[in-house]
Amino acid sequence: MTESDFVSLEVAAALLGISIRHVRRLANSGRLTQVARGVLERDSVDRYLMSQRQGRTRSWAEHTAWGAIALLSGEEADWLGPTQASRIRRTLRELVDPSDLVSRVRDRAHVQTFAAHRAAMPRLRAIVVRPNMNALGIVDSGEARIDGYIAASDLDNAIRTLGLRIESSGDITLRVTNFDFNQVRKLVSTSAVVAALDAATVLDPRIRGVGQRALAEMLEAYR
């Protein structure tokens, strides 16, 4: 890594257009990766900026975000009340720009990047649920990388027992959620919506474009 891989709290605040106090809260919650006191990984700042479109669109709460994903996937969202579900359906029909959807559901999970010894990878795959990127025509990274969802309640144990270490260039991307993981597992495993949302926020412009186009088609079909 080089010095350009890291930014100070002040620089992160300027990039995101928020206060330094807000940046600290994001770092404490795991939404931004802090590597030392007052120092953040630049990639985590870029990913957050990509997902929240500089804060122009208010995000939904975690359970609401997963409810919207379920509805867009043609599934029931029993955890939403009838009034809320109706409101979410109406909003989904009104959305045209896929970036607005990405921004609204950004709090479905927070992203952390790790590295680990390759011997830990099989054990980690057993507890991480990975979206089906092949459904978007994106070649699966196979055994070399892991990018998927993990229950927040399992994260600390995984870090401790598998020797995960925070690293911006690591091969492990964990999307940590507090929502009912049985529901998460079902949606991540079966819905191309989750794969498209994940793809639409990566730093690789080619993959990001694939995700955004897929979301645009999904929103059009939903209308």
Image: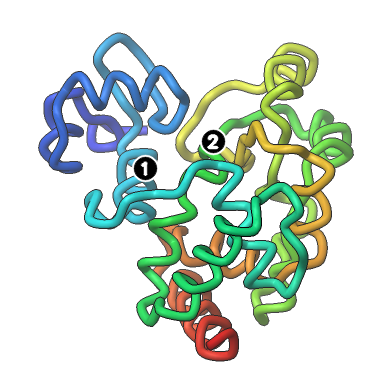
Please state which of residues 141 and 52 is positioned toward the viewer in this rendering. 52
Q: Does residue 167 appear left or right of residue 192 in this picture?
A: left
Q: How is the image coloured?
A: rainbow
Spatial separation of the CA atoms under disc 1 and disc 2: 9 Å
Please state which of residues 42 and 66 is positioned toward the viewer in this rendering. 66
Q: Residues within 10 Å of mark 2 (few under 14, many from 20)?
A: many
User: Dot 2 lies on which element?
Assistant: strand
Q: Earlier in the sequence, mark 1 or mark 2?
A: 1
What percent of the width, then of the height, locates residue 28? 40, 17
Amino acid type shown at disc 2? Thr
Which residue is denoted by mark 1 in the rendering?
43
Amino acid type shown at disc 1? Asp
Q: Does residue 78 appear left or right of residue 173 in this picture?
A: right
Q: Are marks 1 and 2 in contact (CB under 8 Å)?
A: yes
Which residue is denoted by mark 2 in the rendering?
113
What percent of the width, then of the height, locates residue 185? 81, 49
What residue is drawn where x is 78% and y is 39%? 181
Please state which of residues 63 and 155 is positioned toward the viewer in this rendering. 63
